[in-house]
Amino acid sequence: MLTSPVIKLQRTGAPMPQVGFGTWKHTGDKATEAVEAALKVGYRLLDCAADYGNEKECGLGLKHAIDEGIVKRHDVWVVSKLWNTFHRKEHVRAAVKKSLADWGVDYFDIYYMHFPISLEFVPFETRYPPGWFFDGKSQVKHDNVPIQETWEALEELVDEGLIRHLGVSNTNSALLMDLLKYARVKPSVLQIEIHPYNVQTRAVAYAQSQGVAVTAYSSFGPLGWLVFGTSKSAHTQPLFTHPVITAIAAKHPGSTPPQVVLRWATQRGLAIIPKSDTVEQMEQNMKSSGIKLSEEEMAAIGMLDMGLRFNDPADGFEGCHIFS
Ligand code: NAD
């Protein structure tokens, strides 16, 4: 069985797996099978969110693996995220409890605020997950909930043992700086979009300087966003055929371009959560930590930076389409 290196989280000293398994866009029975397969391969962190609409299916995959004796609950980091429509203090608890029930677990190892953007409340019975958009055309309206209100409600759930570590996602350094001023329970992890086209040097340096671990999502850049058929993802040079990446892979016998892209991230001290579709990808991605890139190779990949984001919360203002 493969194993991941770990990153010690400052608040508790707990060892977070550096290579986790991304579950976004895994749906239905395939999500259940993928989670079970990932746990068999050796993944011990499952990155999910209420918004992914697959928490029940992922939870079933975890249950199968526990029933088969592959893992125990405490071996696995179960990770979820608060959706934007549940930012009001009176909705946070119910949202967390629903996600816990869907997963079939009684605590989350990490629970993120998914976006620093509050949207109007949508009751579970009306639509779940509520999303940014509905009916194929309408956008959920913005709400006026300050992040501090949401954060304090989340802190209470840490006190009660429903959440082990809090995280923030899709926030910039200024916002993280502000949050660190009032947070009684500091965020342990920042999860942001990072790949060679969006290196985020300063955001990573600031978070790490504050003892906040950083998890990179969408490590493969445009690839994870192609399903939406957006022009941005379709017109960006795929990373796996980029000459800088292929040349580096060629210098490391047995390595592949996806592994080089992932290793560039983990060698920066970042955690990664690639979404693998096959057992072969799961194994390949987990084995990426075995490569050692030179300083020159790390720098050459870093030079691909264009500040290009495929998931920019600033696009989430009313009237703008986030996936345009
Ligand atoms: P990704 O960058 O992990 O790319 C996924 C794609 O890469 C899939 O098409 C998969 O088939 C392919 N792939 C994976 N391993 C491969 C390999 N070894 N060789 C060839 N192809 C390979 O995509 P992503 O889903 O955008 O990001 C990963 C995870 O990050 C998500 O599943 C989710 O958990 C998380 N995420 C979080 C946020 C957030 O707002 N916090 C946003 C996006 C994603």
Image: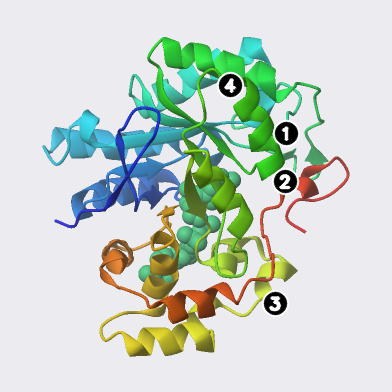
How crowded pointer 4 is (Cα within 10 Å; few <14, some 14-19, many 20+) is rated as: few
- The quarter of the picture where residue 73 lies is top left
Indicate the secondary structure of the residue bearing disc 4.
loop
Identify which amino acid the numbered label 3 is placed on. Answer: His
Label 3 lies in ligand 1 vicinity (Cβ under 8 Å): no
Q: Please give the name of the residue rendered at 66% of the width and 76% of the height, measured from the top-left corner.
A: 236
Label 1 lies in ligand 1 vicinity (Cβ under 8 Å): no
**Residue at numbered disc 2:** 313
Indicate the secondary structure of the residue bearing disc 1.
loop
**Residue at numbered disc 3:** 235
Alpha-carbon span between mark 2 and mark 1: 8 Å
Residue 257, percent from left and from top:
41, 79
Q: Are marks 2 and 3 in contact (CB under 8 Å)?
A: no
Q: In terms of sequence position, does the residue under pointer 1 or pointer 4 come before the other? A: 1
Residue 164, percent from left and from top:
38, 24
Q: Are marks 2 and 1 in contact (CB under 8 Å)?
A: yes
Vertical arrangement, residue 278 with respect to residue 155, above or below: below
Q: Is residue 274 left or right of residue 279?
A: right
Q: In terms of sequence position, does the residue under pointer 2 or pointer 1 come before the other? A: 1
Q: In terms of sequence position, does the residue under pointer 2 or pointer 3 come before the other? A: 3
Identify which amino acid the numbered label 2 is placed on. Answer: Pro
Q: Which mark is residue 183?
A: 4
Q: In terms of sequence position, does the residue under pointer 1 or pointer 3 come before the other? A: 1
Alpha-carbon span between mark 1 and mark 3: 28 Å
Alpha-carbon span between mark 3 and mark 4: 41 Å
**Residue at numbered disc 1:** 117
